[in-house]
Image (cartoon, rainbow, N blue to C red):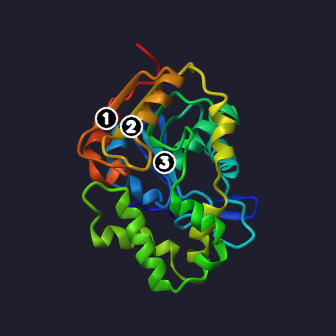
Amino acid sequence: MLTLDRTFDFHGDAVAWGWIKGPDTAPPAVLIHGFPWSAQAWRRIAPWLARERSVYYFDMLGCGQSAKHAEQDVSPAVQNELLANLIDHWGLSKPLVVAHDFGGLAALRGHFLSGIEYSALYLIDAVSVLPSGSPFFAHAKEHFEAFAETPGFTHDALFRAFVNFGSLHGLLAETIDMYAAPWRGDVGQPAFYRQILHSGSGYIQEVQDCYAPVAFPVHLVWGEHDDNIPVSQGRELADALNADSFTVVPDAAHIVMEDAPEAVVAALLGARDGRA
């Protein structure tokens, strides 16, 4: 398990983060998880990447160990603002950024809308192009109060089905429990549905309109069996950014870091800052 033993004050909310120090003078890497996961999605990746880089990771606002409360705005616009603030707090200049799912949206918005510069960007099954969303998302947004107040055992069953849909062969029970724990109880359960409530296609459209080739390398890694965000959308993103590579992982669905962590490690080890 990754240790998140530090906090960053973001507009009065505590954001949990941690890091693994790499070799002396090692360049930095920032890992950004998606929804409904947490920084623990990188637990099999970060130690390997730390052989070459100093690795920073965090729980996005309203996720994992970070603060959750009813008054929060946890929209994608806030998450890329948080990313910019964290990179500044850490004193990083042009870090390598690796991002999955809604973390990918935060990274893309971070560059195109917040002006963050990266040394390289790795996107894994990123929320990035329209159409986006699922019938479950639409239904949960429309009936937020009902879902937020549903009995805990019903919520647990929905969560299990939701995360398993992102895995090709299904996740281990202990893995599901690890991801589910922050989303349980009087605080966690409403926070789960709040993330859905505050999402929206407009946040994707806003940055999608800005897509263009960038000065740093961009590499995409995509699960071949991703039914959430299909490979065709990944290729559309790759074309829009003139990506340097597009790797399809055969034995993986949406949560590639769980289905095929070795493929992510292989893509990242020896990652270059700059093009050949």
Residue linked to disc 1: 248
> Dot 3, crowdedness within 10 Å: few (<14), some or many (≥20)?
many
Residue 49 placement, left or right of 120:
left
Q: Position of residue 151 (x, y in %)?
A: 52, 86
Circle 1 SS class: strand
Picture quarter with the N terminus:
bottom left
Q: Are marks 1 and 3 in contact (CB under 8 Å)?
A: no
Q: Quadrant of the C terminus?
A: top left
Task: Please state which of residues 150 and 142 is positioned toward the viewer in this rendering.
Answer: 142
Within 10 Å of the Cα at label 2, are there few (<14), some (14-19), or many (20+) other Cα atoms? many
Residue at screen point 68% across, 72% down? 69
Find residue 37 and report its horizontal and vertical position in percent.
46, 60
Identify the disc placed on residue 101: 3
Residue 202 visible (yes or no): yes
Mark 1: few, some, or many residues within 10 Å (few <14, many ≥20)? some
**What numbered label is drawn on residue 168?**
none
Q: Position of residue 77 (x, y in %)?
A: 70, 48
Q: Residue furthest top?
A: 276
Structural distance between the alpha carbons of marks 2 and 1 = 8 Å
Q: Nearer the viewer, mark 2 or mark 3?
A: 2
Compared with residue 201, is residue 146 higher up or lower down, i.e. above or below? below
Identify the mark nearer the N-term, 1 or 3: 3
Of circles 2 and 1, the one toward us is 2
Label located before the other in sequence (2 or 1) = 2
Q: Residue at x 72, y 61 (%)?
A: 73
Q: How far is the residue under mark 2 from the one under mark 3? A: 13 Å
Inspect the image, locate mark 3, and give the three-letter code of the amino acid beneath it: Asp
Q: Earlier in the sequence, mark 2 or mark 3?
A: 3
- The mark tally for this picture is 3
In this rendering, would 139 be left or right of 152? right
Mark 2 element type: helix
Q: Amino acid at mark 2?
A: Val
